[in-house]
Image (tube, rainbow, N blue to C red):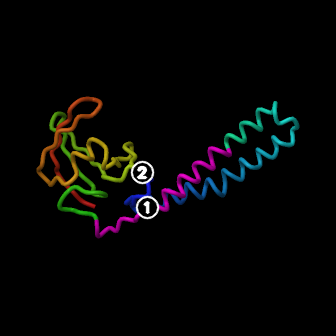
């Protein structure tokens, strides 16, 4: 988040906004309440609850700042800007693993939106980088932690 624009789906932006709302409107007030209750217990120098509450509040404030900076940098990706003739940001890519003969689908997203468990891979990940600008029928070879994987691009869509 170094002052550059970060392309993101409207869904990704809404998730950040929900997370920020939760931090500001729910978690921070709860932590402030815990801090106040701990403060009322007396000597702060030996009060572990107070120290934990202060640390928790610091962590929440850091998360709030991070999400606010991120929201200030995001640029929503318009559905019309998603390519369907080649792999690009926000495209859905259907791949055939040439070794296992199994198909997988990934959506190529920015690093801030990546969630491999839900099929969203970063455009800056090894697989994401290898796929960018490729077209249906192209084969790519990617080195991943488990070894080298070869894919054939079977489909590209939104």
Residue 12 position, x and y percent, is 44, 58
Q: Position of residue 106 (x, y in %)?
A: 29, 49
Foreground pick, 117 / 9: 9
Q: Is residue 123 left or right of residue 66?
A: left
Q: Are marks 2 and 1 in contact (CB under 8 Å)?
A: yes
Cα–Cα gap, marks 2 and 1: 10 Å
Drawn side of residue 4 relative to residue 15, left or right: left
Is 71 within the magenta? yes
**Which quadrant of the figure has residue 45?**
top right
The magenta-colored residue range is: 57-81
59 shown above or below 8: above
Residue at image location 45% in from the left, 60% down from the top: 73
Q: Secondary structure at mark 2?
A: helix
Give the labeled residue for mark 1.
74
Residue furthest out toward the left: 137
Q: Which residue is mark 2?
A: 112
């Amino acid at each position: 988040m170094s002052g550059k624009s970060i392309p993101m789906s409207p869904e990704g932006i809404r998730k950040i906004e929900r997370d920020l709302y939760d931090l500001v409107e729910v978690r921070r007030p709860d932590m402030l309440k815990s801090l106040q209750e701990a403060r009322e217990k007396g000597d702060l120098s030996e009060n572990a609850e107070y120290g934990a509450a202060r640390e928790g509040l610091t962590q929440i404030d850091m998360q709030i700042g991070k999400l606010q900076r991120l929201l200030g940098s995001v640029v929503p990706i318009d559905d019309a800007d998603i390519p369907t003739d080649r792999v690009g940001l926000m495209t859905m890519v259907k791949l055939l693993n040439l070794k296992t003969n199994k198909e997988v689908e990934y959506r190529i997203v920015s690093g801030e939106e990546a969630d491999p468990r839900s099929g969203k891979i970063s455009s800056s990940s090894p697989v994401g980088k290898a796929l960018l600008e490729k077209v249906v029928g192209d084969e790519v070879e990617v080195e991943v932690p488990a070894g080298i994987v070869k894919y054939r691009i079977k489909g590209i869509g939104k």
